[in-house]
């Protein structure tokens, strides 16, 4: 994996925790309305939004950059059109789980062979072909 995508995947992992923290602030802010009043609840909700939205926008943009740079599939034009036209973000969410996460985890169609060509020749051929 090239260094650019390795860094981007590391950023997604870190920023994912900020999204989780931001999402947990939302119910806490709503519940604290009775305890701390309107001002306390508003502060907690604003903190939650500030924790959630910057990572969300980064991940949103990374899905488009991933499609442009690394997509391995049969429907490249379809994904590009859907991501460009569709504005609610559902297609990017689906793409994130179907393509970006497998690439981050080195699985599925994005599995990379960890053996170098020299090491790969050290193994005998498989009996079934």
Image: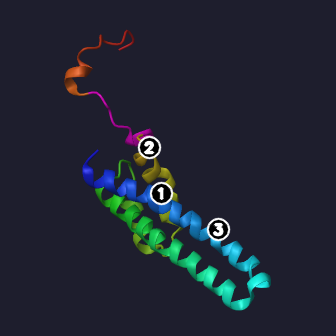
Disc 2 + disc 1, Cβ < 8 Å: no
Mark toward the start of the polypeptide (2 vs 1): 1
Residue assigned mark 2: 105
Label disc, if present, on residue 96 of the rendered structure: 1
In the image, is residue 65 above or below residue 98?
below
Q: Residues within 10 Å of mark 2 (few under 14, many from 20)?
A: few
Q: In which quarter of the image is residue 113?
A: top left
Residue assigned mark 3: 24
For the point 52% across and 60% down, the residue is: 17
Secondary structure beneath disc 1?
Answer: helix
Q: Which of 61 and 52 is in front in this view?
A: 52
Drawn side of residue 117 relative to residue 15, left or right: left
Q: Quadrant of residue 7?
A: bottom left
For the point 23% across and 28% down, the residue is: 116
Q: What stretch is highlighted in magenta?
A: 107-115
**Rendering coords of residue 104 (x, y %):** 41, 48
**Rendering coords of residue 21 (x, y %):** 58, 66
In the image, is residue 110 above or below residue 119?
below
Q: Is residue 60 highlighted in magenta?
A: no
Disc 2 + disc 3, Cβ < 8 Å: no
Q: Residues within 10 Å of mark 1 (few under 14, many from 20)?
A: many
Disc 3 + disc 1, Cβ < 8 Å: no
Mark toward the start of the polypeptide (3 vs 1): 3
For the point 65% across and 86% down, the residue is: 42
Q: Which of 116 and 55 is in front in this view?
A: 55
The answer to whether residue 88 shows anywhere in this view is no
Q: Nearer the viewer, residue 106 or 24?
A: 24
Q: Is residue 109 highlighted in magenta?
A: yes
For discs 2 and 1, the disc positioned in front in the rendered view: 2
CA separation in Å, label 2 and label 3: 26 Å
């Amino acid at each position: 994996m090239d260094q650019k995508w390795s860094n981007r995947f590391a950023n997604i992992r870190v920023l994912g925790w900020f999204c989780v923290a931001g999402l947990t602030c939302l119910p806490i802010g709503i519940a604290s309305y009775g305890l701390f009043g309107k001002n306390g609840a508003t502060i907690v909700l604003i903190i939650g939004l500030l924790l959630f939205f910057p990572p969300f926008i980064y991940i949103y943009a990374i899905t488009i950059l991933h499609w442009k740079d690394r997509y391995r599939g049969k429907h490249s034009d379809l994904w590009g059109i859907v991501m460009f036209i569709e504005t609610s973000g559902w297609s990017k969410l689906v793409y994130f789980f179907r393509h970006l996460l497998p690439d981050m985890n080195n699985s599925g169609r994005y599995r990379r062979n960890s053996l170098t060509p020299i090491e790969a020749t050290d193994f005998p051929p498989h009996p079934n072909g």
